[in-house]
Amino acid sequence: NATTAAQAMALEDGKAHPLRAGPHSTKFFELLESRRRLPVSREHQNFLDVYHKAQVMVLSSDTGSGKTTQIPQFVLFDEFASGKVVACTQPRRLAAVTAARRVAAEMDVQLGEEVGYSVRFDDCTTSDQTKLKYMTDGRLLREAMNDGNFSAYSCIIIDEAHERTKSTDILMALLKLAVASRPDLKVIIMSATIDTETFTSYFSGASTFQVLGRAHPVTINYLSEATPDYFFAALHTVKHIHEKMADGDILVFLTAVGEIEQFCSKLRDGLNNLEVLPLYASLSPLEQDKVFSRSSLRKCVVSTNVAETSVTIDGIVYVVDPGVSKQSGYNPRADLDILLTGPISKASARQRAGRAGRTRPGVCFRLYTEDTFNNTFIPTSIPGIFQSEIMSEILLLKTMGYNAVGRFDFITPPHTEVYLRGLQDLVALGYIADNGAITQKGRMAVKLPVHPAWYNAILESHKLGCSDEMISIAALASTQQSIFWRPYGPRYAADIAHRRFSCGQSDHISQLSAFHAYGHIREEMNVDQWCFDFFLCRRTLEEVIQIRRQLKGIAETMLGGPLKVAPFDANYKVIIRKALARGFYYRSAIKCEDQGSDIYVTVHGNHPAGIHPGSGLVGVNHEWVVYDTFLYTGKQYIQNVTAVDPDWLIDLEYFQDDKLSRKRGAGELRQPNVKLSLDKARAKRGQSSAHVPSTV
Ligand code: ADP
Ligand code: MG
């Protein structure tokens, strides 16, 4: 029942809407005309010819040629008779949502009906109606946990595969297995880079299909001398373009939200007749839409990496590329996340420049020297699997029955030490048994839509009577950004405003206080002003509410009853801190007496760390703390810190200083303070330091 391009086009040209009663709208025909001009559309039949013969296909074409919006529609038409769903994954939420909205408009249907999207904490699909589903790769991976054969789908399209996120990589491995057992399942790997060797050799026997773009030439300008300040150089460049150069919109790439907002406000202050538009994932849909709408003024879009390949803005003629992005790394020995601004890859630089030549010849200003490009930039960006810890991934694969995760067929396997560190921490949390098998607890933890470490904290909080609070705390820790807005300029003012919510014993409780305050005033009119005055990020707070709602449902099922709300008495903070201690003991640190104020060392590994400057615990003297993140951003910090009492830790198996705990990699309790302090706590409680059975 193979279809042809002509059949699909005849249906589109017809007066009647194929999916519902009534005619196509006028808007539909307007969009149709521009869709038909896309490079991908011209290859419609050729695409189908390859698609019909191949089970796995690797498709590449320039950004903006119609991959994300058109290919899924071609496939949908072809697979419609199967009654199954077509999925198209995106590494980013923003891209999944924008693509779904765009395609719903192109197909002239209501978003969420035939065409929908599914991203974490936001599902806009109708179970029996949705036939084309844009989703984040993480979302599809979650689904695969319960259905490794992807049986609901006829075709799975992995878009932006060149980004190589952790989820994309694992999905590709699972799909490689699934196609062997399901001859009717088709897979398309889409990438904006022509270098598809990695994918074709991984999926042996895959067909390749390349759509040649019709990009216009882009003139590349380099600096003759390196600049010490790319921010200033970028401002200067935009000013130059706006004042001296011909019409055409500008796209500037910067690294982070704070930086983008600061850049935008400087532009608005300094230049007239320029529409300045930020673009990043946490913007509201309304603000995002502005980027795509036409304007009578020249537009200057200031964006994160999201505009590099995943969304296309028409009309861009000038690109300003500072050559940097925020990059993550991970050091498994210290369990240390690294977040630094660093040089992009050559592939990224080419993508960025390509954005200027979409509609007519363009110009790219590279704010670095040609020599830097040639000699400093690495060829392609580093895959996500090398950039962070992989506890969730290990647990997920084990749940699916891939017990020997170390031998799992990754496209590029994680570093052995990262894998071992993940295992070690999972054993410490009780999610994996000594023999490497996943435990009952591990099976529960992996079901949470947040990091599995939160499962222990939620269990403990329920025993202590504060699970309602803990769910909020877990939600607060699971957003992309903090609710506390610390803009670059008025950072000091922000820190003062945040003191109103500050708890000197726990950043988790500080966040909870702000969240509760927001909950109380939320129904009032001036909530935006309130958020502004207290430097709180309203969108993030709303995101927390959504995460909380979903988490609550799952947790109540797991706990077998309603959450418990802690009475607001003298013990309120104590029980929350205690529950945190008994959930995050594997990330604990002890004050380092001889190193001056605010220097701690991590219990596992003995690494020095300061308290993050945004924390309410800075300058407060606590002996023991637990933390969410150990982060390097030029200095080593522990972030999201809660002070704990060693008395809450001593009966945990992790802190028994016998051979057993050492075998578990728990505490190579090298720091003499640790043993001393624990022994003191034991003496206080009237216990010996002999092994005491764990209750966690
Ligand atoms: P690719 O995935 O190959 O980069 P897309 O399918 O995303 O290309 O986009 C193809 C074209 O569709 C773009 O060049 C743009 O003209 C148009 N387009 C895509 N998304 C939107 C949108 N949200 N709003 C307006 N136009 C869009
Ligand atoms: Mg795309």
Image: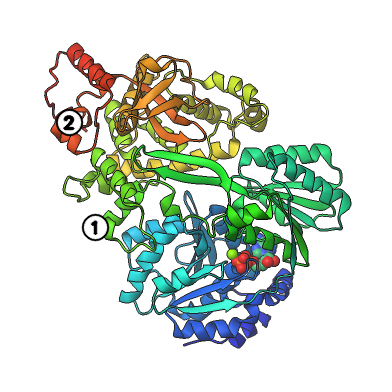
Q: Is residue 523 left or right of residue 353?
A: left
Q: Nearer the viewer, mark 2 or mark 1?
A: 1
> Is 500 in front, or is 66?
66
Tell me where residue 565 appears, x and y as whole percent: 37, 28
> Is 548 in front, or is 267?
267
Q: Is residue 612 left or right of residue 364?
A: left
- Quadrant for ligand 2 reads bottom right
Query: From the Cβ of disc 1, is ligand 2 less than 8 Å away?
Result: no
Label 1 residue SS: loop
Residue under the point 75% across and 37% down: 265
Question: Is the residue marked by circle 1 packed among few (<14), some (14-19), or many (20+) residues within 10 Å?
Answer: few
Residue under the point 19% across and 34% down: 662
Res 407 quadrant in image? bottom left
Question: Looking at the image, how many numbered discs can be counted on the residues?
Answer: 2
Tell me where residue 294 appears, x and y as whole percent: 78, 57
Q: Which mark is residue 694?
A: 2
Res 535 quadrant in image? top right
Q: Which mark is residue 404?
A: 1
Q: Which mark is residue 608?
A: none
Q: Quadrant of the C terminus?
A: top left
Q: Is residue 600 left or right of residue 267?
A: left
Query: From the Cβ of disc 2, is ligand 2 less than 8 Å away?
Result: no
> Is 431 in front, or is 338?
338
- The answer to whether residue 594 of the structure is visible from this angle is yes
Tell me where residue 8 appears, x and y as whole percent: 59, 83
Question: Is the residue marked by circle 2 packed among few (<14), some (14-19), or many (20+) residues within 10 Å?
Answer: few
Label 2 residue SS: loop
- The answer to whether residue 16 of the structure is visible from this angle is no
Residue under the point 47% across and 48% down: 121
> Is 569 in front, or is 247?
247
